[in-house]
Amino acid sequence: MKIFTALLGTETNTFSPFATGYQNFNQTYLVRGGQHGEHPSTFAVPLVIWKRRAQERGWQVVESLAAFATPAGLTLRKVYEAYRDEILADLRAAMPVDAIFLNLHGAMIADGYDDCEGDLIAAVRKIVGPEAPIGVELDLHCHLTQLTVDQATAIITFKEYPHIDFAERAEELFIIIADTLAGKVKPHMALYDCQMIGVFHTTREPMKSYVADMQALEGREGVLSVSLAHCFPWGDVPEMGARTLVITDNRADYGAEVAQSLGQKLFAMRDQLVPDYLTIDEALDRAVAALDQKGPVVLADVSDNSGGGAPNDSTFILRRMLERGVTNAAVACIWDPIAVALAMEAGEGATFDLRLGGKMGPMSGDPVDLQVTVSKVVEEAHQYLGQGDDRGLAKLGQAAALKTAGIDIVVNTHRTQTFSPEAFSCVGIDPTQKQILVVKSMQHFYAGFAPIAADILYVAAPGAMLPHFDQLPYRRINRSMWPLMAGQSQE
Ligand SMILES: [Zn+2]
């Protein structure tokens, strides 16, 4: 047997102020021929697992492009087309292949392509013909389009948000495709449109039990896999929206029944799913009131999460903390390569005046002018995402810790959200000793920070990922979905 694997992904925020191009892929993840190194990036973990499982069976593995860009605005057309065509050329050269494994994100939008994944999978299908199984792993923040489902053989999305389960889902997909090749199963996918959008944290109820219920259905009555595509609400394309997907062993009617009942169950829970978003002052009031608790209060700056395409350099929360005289606090990470370069040049212990953040546009707020002292600089800083042995390394680039007026600020050169406490400790800040931690992240921070946090607050500051959907300037989505449909308010 011979399998072919590739990774191509980003999560396109059509409201983000800057395009996704070669430089972003280059800086985030761009590997050819399986050179993933000894400690694979989170993006490469599924590819490494598929290769390991295939080689255990004595199969041949052809690894094509592995390319991922930190979420930002619309992907440049020439960039998407070049990467797609590179994968297709590799595939043609590798033919005949028995199965294809694609690690995609599922919310990549390029100039001229609303559905990059559907386009890519359809092109792969054209080359390999109708019989070869195509297995696809997607982020749950995907636009699970009809074309994608029609052209692939089996699709599995992550179940957990934060995404701590990409390795388990890769293992499951491998088994379904291997069993298909062995003639043991005949996957059939049933898709159901939930008619809703939102952000659904699986760390709390009722989603926690919903995930457990999805898992309980698997392996019974011919159900091979159950996925919920949460949707990515900052991608303004016609097929954006939550969908359930059930793969059965050729039980089309039963699969459709399960997909529908799961979708209706999600819709029925809709009001309980909306996270409790606070204003900046509400969050700071609660954090200050909780100061005698054990451990820091974590404030998630969800609107400036580069994991969803925001710039990651906004200053709204920092400015308000400075105005209010908040101390014993730390902020990670503000993407500001110029500030990092100045800190590197000045060196540890140096004090100087700095204009920080707020550079990428109105959604970043205004820069703040500060006197800072450099407490530490690191040439190659890292944090982690995931769990156990399969947790992936996530780079921060060059990083510096800056001290000002009782607040420690981590600035870095690789635009990324904050995943784990290492984002602080890598530059010598002990996050457990702070009373307030501000992290730029929507939800991925949760797995890493929950164990040290006294409380976790979600803050809807201004920004490119504002979580109030009725305030987003949508032009192309289906507006009949909850919570946008007439007569329904969001909360
Ligand atoms: Zn996601």
Image (spheres, rainbow, N blue to C red):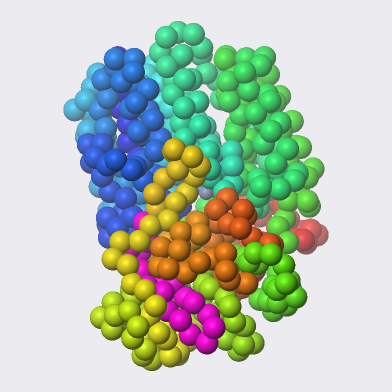
Q: Between residue 75 and residue 417, name the one nearer to us.
A: 417
Q: Is residue 67 visible?
A: yes
Q: Overall secondary structure of the magenta stretch? A: strand
Query: Is residue 409 in the magenta section?
Result: yes
Residue at screen point 69% across, 33% down: 212
| The quarter of the displayed image where residue 21 is located | bottom left
Coordinates of residue 81 in the picture (x, y in percent): 29, 47
Coordinates of residue 203 in the picture (x, y in percent): 66, 47
Q: Is residue 320 visible?
A: no
Magenta stretch in the rendered image: 395-414
| The quarter of the displayed image where residue 322 is located | bottom right
Coordinates of residue 66 in the picture (x, y in percent): 30, 42
Which quadrant of the figure contains the N terminus? top left
Q: Is residue 175 above or below residue 351?
A: above
Residue at screen point 65% across, 28% down: 215
- Taking 197 as reference, is 360 left or right? left
Residue at screen point 25% across, 81% down: 345
Query: Is residue 398 in the magenta section?
Result: yes
Q: Is residue 383 above or below residue 153?
A: below
